[in-house]
Image (cartoon, rainbow, N blue to C red):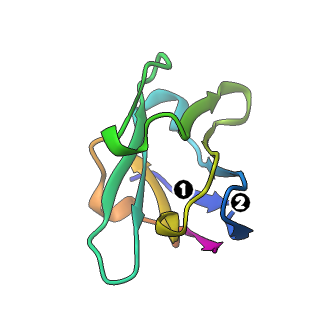
Amino acid sequence: QVQLVESGGGLVQAGGSMRLSCAGSGINNRAMAWYRQAPGKQREFVARISITGVTSVANDLRGRFTIARDYAKNTVHLQINNLKFEDTAIYYCNTNPPQSNSWGQGTQVTVSS
């Protein structure tokens, strides 16, 4: 089980940017990913990063979402640019594939139009 804490969410206007952070022990030794759950929808995959830093982003989010590691701080970041109203969701990090007992509280991102 990995204890994870997400941060960095908030309220932002459409077109703005936001950087989310995920911190926890053992992150450097695991493939990690960001997921999100919009109101009334199921949780969905956003982006993943391997232990060595190889990344992939969901097809419909490429170009605006970037995932990166900070090995010194045992942290994984999600940079979101040109935010859209439909990006409003709770964003979670977890291992990839996700561990059922490692879901945290997430961080709320709200995009105003």
State which quarter of the image contains the C terminus.
bottom right
Asked if residue 64 lies left or right of residue 58, the reply is: right
Q: Position of residue 20 (x, y in %)?
A: 65, 52
Q: Is residue 108 magenta?
A: yes
Q: Position of residue 69 (x, y in %)?
A: 61, 30
Above or below 94: residue 71? above
The residue shown at (71%, 71%) is: 10
Q: Which three-letter amino acid code belongs to the residue tagged 1? A: Leu
Residue 8, disc: 2
Q: Position of residue 102 (x, y in %)?
A: 40, 60
The segment highlighted magenta reads 107-113
Above or below 79: residue 41? below
Q: Which three-letter amino acid code belongs to the residue tagged 2? A: Gly
Asked if residue 79 lies left or right of residue 55, the reply is: right
Q: Is residue 58 magenta?
A: no
The residue at which mark 1 appears reads as: 4
The residue shown at (35%, 44%) is: 60
